[in-house]
Image: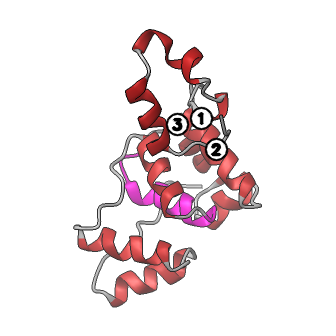
Amino acid sequence: MKTNISTEELMDVLKQVPPDAVIEAAELPKEAMATSERPFYEYMKAMFSQHGYKIKDVILAADFSYSYGQKLLRQERHTSERDYILRLCLAGGLDLTEVQRALKLYGMSPLYPRVERDAVLISCLYHGKKEIDAVNDILCASNMEPLLASSEPG
């Protein structure tokens, strides 16, 4: 089986395999499964690396202190601010599919196209607008709140 299986493909496999034989019968690659106790952190670390970024650079580009950014990524410090996770995703160069997965892994709702602000963010991601300042400019031009910046002290 291929190592980069989409969630939809994984769902198709799971529909066909009995519960007691999921892993063995489906020959699911370990990479397809979130086996870590910190799947969000492992996923983000892999995405940053895949896009050629270092964690420290992403955290700083997202405008967080390094300490706070690390705690967010490792989920040692939980936030209910979806914008914080979006800032990390944008700073790390994630595309729409990757952003949606990151939000889900963090326990947040994915971007939804029927919510105006989310629709603008989705469009930005589709069109390769991943710089936080550019996204904020577009949000402001659309009379929407920019991505919330951290109020966490350095």
Quarter holding the C terminus?
A: bottom right
Q: Tell me the element at label 3.
A: loop
Residue bearing mark 2: 4
Q: Quadrant of residue 73?
A: top right
Pointer 2 or 1: first along the chain: 2
Which percent across, then down, holds residue 57? 72, 61
Pointer 1 or 3: first along the chain: 1
Res. 75 mark: 3
Residue bearing mark 1: 32
Q: CA distance from mark 2 to mark 1?
A: 7 Å
Indicate left or right for 67 with 54 as reference: left
Residue 5 in sight here: yes
Residue type, mark 3 in image: Gln
Mark 2–mark 1 CB contact (< 8 Å): yes
Question: Relative to residue 91, is residue 40 depicted above or below?
Answer: above
**Residue at 38% in and 28% down:** 15
Q: CA distance from mark 1 to mark 3?
A: 21 Å
Residue type, mark 1 in image: Ala
Q: Range of the magenta residues?
A: 79-93
Q: Tell me the element at label 2.
A: loop
